[in-house]
Amino acid sequence: MSARPKISVIGAGNVGASVAQYLVEKELGDVVLVDVVEGIPQGKALDLAQAGPVHGYDSDLVGSNGYDETADSDIVVITAGLARKPGMTRDDLLFKNAEIVGSVVEQVVKRSKNAILILVTNPLDAMVQLAWKKSGFPAERVIGMAGVLDSARFRTFIARELDVSVENVTAFVLGGHGDSMVPLPRYSTVAGIPITELLPAEKVAQIVDRTRNGGIEIVNYLKSGSAYYAPSSAVVEMVDAILRDKKKILPCAVSLKGEYGYTDLFIGVPVKLGRKGVEEVIQIELTAEEKAGLAKSAEAVKELCAILKV
Ligand code: TXD
């Protein structure tokens, strides 16, 4: 392998393979793709390597069914697990995915003691908490991806509603992934203008509702799996912020140490991402309604963690 950063992606399914693709297209590092299914990570890694000459990337790509190739990774993205089918909630995945994520983390941390872990597997907030406990890593190196995706969905719908560029739209979301996310419309803007000044309250409420159900809308279309283009793009934005030490403010599921009134609970809040991982939790004053939304979200996460005893 080269002097480039090393990023391991565990789970070479829909999200994992797209993460690998976007990572090398941005030439963020060398990529190791791992999966339990024999041949899949090897085949996808080789296929992606052969796109290199066309795209113009030199990243190394390796596929494996084991973990030795992941040794000394800078970042490990964990997507291994089952995805939702129609009629399933994220929480239905709890036990099976806890088992998978637990075993993956064990294998990973043995070989990459200084890595930053990015969790993707659902139910997201509980899986991050579990990964943190299992890894023994400091909390700033264990991060869950959900908020970047939820806010990207929110931004897409706002941009479409107002017929403006998605690049002009910023969104602020807190809380757990999906159903229990807490969007903050007063801090969601178009070129700096809060959307509450651009859209009637009912329209904002409709968009919030569609965003909360953004995952299931896609599951219902695909039938055989869940979303992966936007989720993997969101992961890659986080990897980019970390590896290039951008100090970018992004909503991520991280461990709170008293911020927003919670301790040792992983939940989505805006954080500063840089080379050390989570470098700061951004705190703002919440209204009573927003606090209640966050409390509901926190309760849902705590409940799953209690079931898993993490
Ligand atoms: O916002 C978010 N956090 C999410 C989460 C957005 C999208 C998807 N989200 C969740 O990620 C989804 O609910 C699943 O729990 C994971 C992975 O979703 P994906 O769509 O990639 O699922 P796939 O295509 O089924 O891929 C999962 C792969 C598959 O290839 C399995 O063989 C592999 O995981 N797998 C494993 N790899 C390594 N080790 C073990 N033990 C293992 N078990 C399964």
Image (spheres, rainbow, N blue to C red):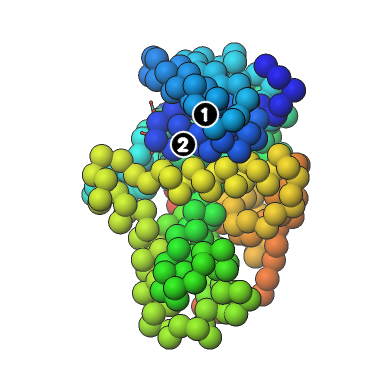
What residue is disc 2 on? 18
- Residue in front for this viewpoint, 78 or 99: 78
Residue at disc 2, secondary structure = helix
The image quarter containing residue 204 is: bottom left
As measured in the structure, the alpha-carbon distance from the residue carrying label 1 to the one carrying label 2 is 17 Å
Q: Residues within 10 Å of mark 1 (few under 14, many from 20)?
A: few
Mark 1: which amino acid?
Val
Q: CB of mark 1 within 8 Å of CB of mark 2?
A: no
Where in the figure is residue 215, as x and y percent of width and height? 36, 53
Image quadrant containing the N terminus: top right
Residue 93 vs residue 68, the one in the foreground: 68
- Residue 195 vs 156, above or below: the answer is below
SS type, badge 1: helix
Give the residue type that dot 2 points to: Ser
Dot 1 or dot 2: first in sequence order is 2
Q: Nearer the viewer, mark 1 or mark 2?
A: 1
Disc 1: which residue: 54
**Which residue lies at the image location 25% right of the left edge and 50% below the top edge?**
221
